[in-house]
Amino acid sequence: MDRRDFLKKGTAAAGLAASSRVLQPLAAAGTPAAFPNRALGKTGEHLSIIGFGGIVVTDTAQSVANDLVAEAFDRGINYFDVAPTYGNAQERLGPALEPYRQRVFLACKTTKRDRAGAKAELDESLKLLRTDHLDLYQLHALTKMEDLETALGPNGAMETYVKARQEGKVRFIG
């Protein structure tokens, strides 16, 4: 196992371990173990205060991804986030999330700034994640004014986002 894999898997394990420490007093008190959550703005959604970063399943066996997602869901985590830039994370997360898809909030993002690139990446993400919609689709790593102007300008990625929302492929835009 190289350093990157060690850190990635260690972070996932630490997150799950921390969640058990948070939930243990609740379970001991005889109440259901539900991870604390917060409202997401005015969306009406209530998301777990800790999310599942899809990058942790990159280059793992599908069975490991399935186990990590099941453990997270069982502990009350309902926010899952992934991106095409996370290697094969979407390929692993899609099948792992299938049993839970209607009960979780799935966020994805793109680094594409043009309409065509964002559409192609959105369609591929939907396919790999085995879902007909994303709950949140975001502009990933938007750090330069030039990228913002391109994404929001004519033929920019935002045109894809708006159309995808109208078509029911995306619920919220970020």
Image (cartoon, rainbow, N blue to C red):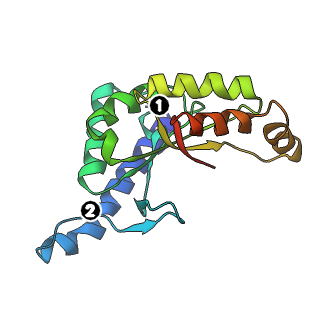
- Left/right placement of residue 168 relative to residue 105 reads right
Q: Residue 65 appears in which quarter of the rendering?
A: top left
Q: Residue 75 appears in which quarter of the rendering?
A: bottom left
- The residue that appears at 57% across and 30% down in the rendered structure is 84
The one of 57 and 148 positioned closer to us in this rendering = 148
- Left/right placement of residue 134 relative to residue 73 reads right
Residue 9 - label: none
Task: Please indicate, yes or no, whether residue 101 appears anywhere in the rendered image.
Answer: yes
Q: Is residue 28 above or below residue 168?
A: below
The one of 123 and 171 positioned closer to us in this rendering = 171
Residue bearing mark 2: 20
Task: Please indicate, yes or no, whether residue 60 appears anywhere in the rendered image.
Answer: no
Q: Earlier in the sequence, mark 1 or mark 2?
A: 2
Residue 28, horizontal then vertical, whole percent: 13, 74
- Left/right placement of residue 82 relative to residue 98 reads right
Q: Amino acid at mark 1?
A: Ala
Q: Residue 121 appears in which quarter of the rendering?
A: top right
Q: Quadrant of the N terminus?
A: top left
The one of 43 and 48 positioned closer to us in this rendering = 43
- The residue that appears at 40% across and 26% down in the rendered structure is 130
Q: Secondary structure at mark 2?
A: helix
> Could you classify mark 1 by the number of other residues whose Cα lies within 10 Å: few (under 14), some (14-19), or many (20 or more)?
many
- The residue that appears at 10% across and 74% down in the rendered structure is 30
Residue 14, horizontal then vertical, whole percent: 38, 55
> Could you classify mark 2 by the number of other residues whose Cα lies within 10 Å: few (under 14), some (14-19), or many (20 or more)?
some
Q: Secondary structure at mark 1?
A: helix
Residue 89 - label: 1
Q: Nearer the viewer, mark 1 or mark 2?
A: 1
Q: Amino acid at mark 2?
A: Ser
